[in-house]
Image (cartoon, grey):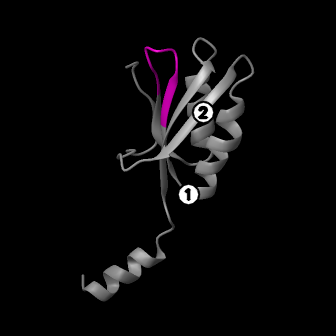
């Protein structure tokens, strides 16, 4: 493939946004991870979610910027019905999200 075609192919690819999120509050034992998997898949995001031993939930969301923003700013700030989010910190990430969205073991 020549470089002109390579550059054109990259230019036509939609932008991808990847963020790592730490969510605190009543977020464990309330189906937050399963809810996150369902919502992320609905939005077509790649990444993962897992519980942390400190009681928080950590997630990596990657995909179309508007979908990532929706997941972080709207959905995760509210969480599933039984949860109570008290803090949410999101920061850019270069981590590989893999393909699809999955639940990972606690760390």
Q: Quadrant of residue 37?
A: top right
Task: Where is residue 23? Give x, y as percent.
Answer: 57, 28
Neighbor class of circle 1 (other Cα within 10 Å; few <14, some 14-19, many 20+) is: some
Give the image quarter of residue 41: top right
Density class for disc 2 (Cα within 10 Å; few <14, some 14-19, many ≥20) is some
Q: State whether residue 67 is above or below residue 59.
A: below
Residue 49, image x, y percentages: 48, 30
Is 13 placed above or below 54 here? below
Residue under label 1, please give it: 64
Observer-nearest of 86 and 105: 86
Q: Residue furthest top?
A: 29
Q: From the image, tell me which residue sits under label 2.
A: 88
Q: Which residues are magenta?
A: 50-59
Q: Residue at x 39, y 20 (%)?
A: 105
* CA distance for labels 1 and 2: 20 Å
What residue is drawn where x is 62% and y is 28%? 87
Q: What residue occupies the far right of the structure in this picture?
A: 81
């Amino acid at each position: 493939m020549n470089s002109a075609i390579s550059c054109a192919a990259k230019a036509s690819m939609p932008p991808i946004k990847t963020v790592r999120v730490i969510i605190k509050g009543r977020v464990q034992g309330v189906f937050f991870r399963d809810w996150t998997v369902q919502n992320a898949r609905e939005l077509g995001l790649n990444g993962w979610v897992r519980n942390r031993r400190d009681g928080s939930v950590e997630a990596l969301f990657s995909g179309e910027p508007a979908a990532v923003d929706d997941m972080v700013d709207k959905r995760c700030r509210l969480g599933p019905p039984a949860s109570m989010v008290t803090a949410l910190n999101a920061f850019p990430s270069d981590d590989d999200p893999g393909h699809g969205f999955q639940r990972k073991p606690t760390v």
